[in-house]
Image (cartoon, helix red, strand yellow):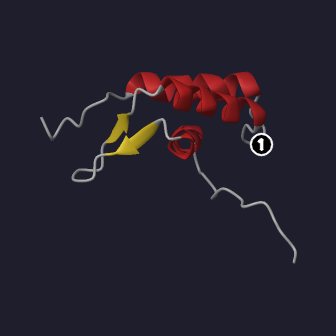
Amino acid sequence: MLMTKERRPAIRTLRGWAISVLQEAGAIHECEEHGWVQDRADPHARESALDLARRDPPTGISPEAAVAEVRGVLDSIGDTCPECA
């Protein structure tokens, strides 16, 4: 049986790519009711996301720029949904 590595879906922006990496690592999740992205505040998941960004940056992006984008996304979101409060 031929086994292939599952490919990530095509992402149009670097920010979108960073969000997908953070979701894959379990560092962020969406509010079930409103859809806002929330930080899970899990240091292990954050580190896993940064490792993923370093190892597998998007084509044409340096590992340092990929890590910077992931950090930027993490810095731009909170841990609560603004509509749930």
- Quick one: 58 or 44, which is closer to the camera? 44
Going by the image, does 20 lie left or right of 29? right
Q: Residue at (50%, 44%) from the top-left corner?
A: 23
In the rendered image of this protein, does residue 54 appear above or below residue 21? above
Going by the image, does 38 lie left or right of 52? left
**Residue found at the far left of this picture:** 85
- Say what amino acid the circle numbered 1 marks: Thr
**Residue found at the far right of this picture:** 2
Classify residue 48 by image quadrant.
top right
Residue 31, image x and y in percent? 28, 46
In the rendered image of this protein, does residue 64 appear above or below residue 6? above
Q: Residue at (75%, 27%) from the top-left corner?
A: 63
Secondary structure at numbered mark 1:
loop
Classify residue 29 by image quadrant.
top left
- Quick one: 37 or 40, which is closer to the camera? 40
Residue 65, image x and y in percent? 68, 25
Q: Quadrant of the C terminus?
A: top left
Residue 78, image x and y in percent? 32, 27
Classify residue 45 by image quadrant.
top right
Q: For mark 1, what is the residue?
A: 59
